[in-house]
Amino acid sequence: MTLFATPVFDATVIFEGNELFKGQGSATQWAQRLAAEIGSPVVAKKIGTGWALCGTVDGVDCVWGIYGQRLKRISIG
């Protein structure tokens, strides 16, 4: 089963229409899991009132938030 199909089940906040992790600890744990899944470094980054996962895939900077209790690439800004 891929990480992207695994339920997140953590507290979330909404910032600029995007659902983000509420706490740094849970975001950091998911960043580590995502990094292992995609084979590239991922960090938790504070964005507004929540935390998103940030990394690079195939040379493209990506940001992941939460959508329907799953990880999803989002656009911030």
Image: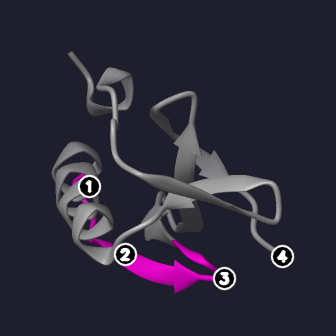
Say which of 34 and 61 sits in front.
34
Q: Which residue is mark 4?
A: 77
Say which of 76 and 17 sits in front.
17
Report the mark closest to the observer, 3 or 4.
3
For badge 2, the amino acid type reads Ala
Give how far across and how far down residue 46 sits, in percent.
Answer: 50, 84
Give how far across and how far down residue 8 sits, in percent.
Answer: 34, 37
**Residue at (46%, 32%) from the top-left corner?**
70
Start-end of magenta stretch: 39-50
**Residue neighbourhood size for the residue with mark 4, other residues' Cα within 10 Å, grouped as few (<14), some (14–19), many (≥20):** few
Question: In the structure shown, which secondary structural element does the residue marked by tag 4 occupy?
Answer: loop
The image quadrant of residue 49 is bottom right
Q: Which residue is mark 2?
A: 44
Residue 18 part of the magenta-drawn span: no
Q: Which mark is residue 18?
A: none
Quarter of the figure with the C terminus: bottom right
Q: Which residue is mark 1?
A: 30
Report the mark closest to the observer, 3 or 2.
3
Q: Which residue is mark 3?
A: 48
Q: CA distance from mark 2 to mark 1?
A: 8 Å
Q: CA distance from mark 4 to mark 2?
A: 17 Å
Looking at this view, name the residue that lies furthest to the top. 1
The image quadrant of residue 4 is top left
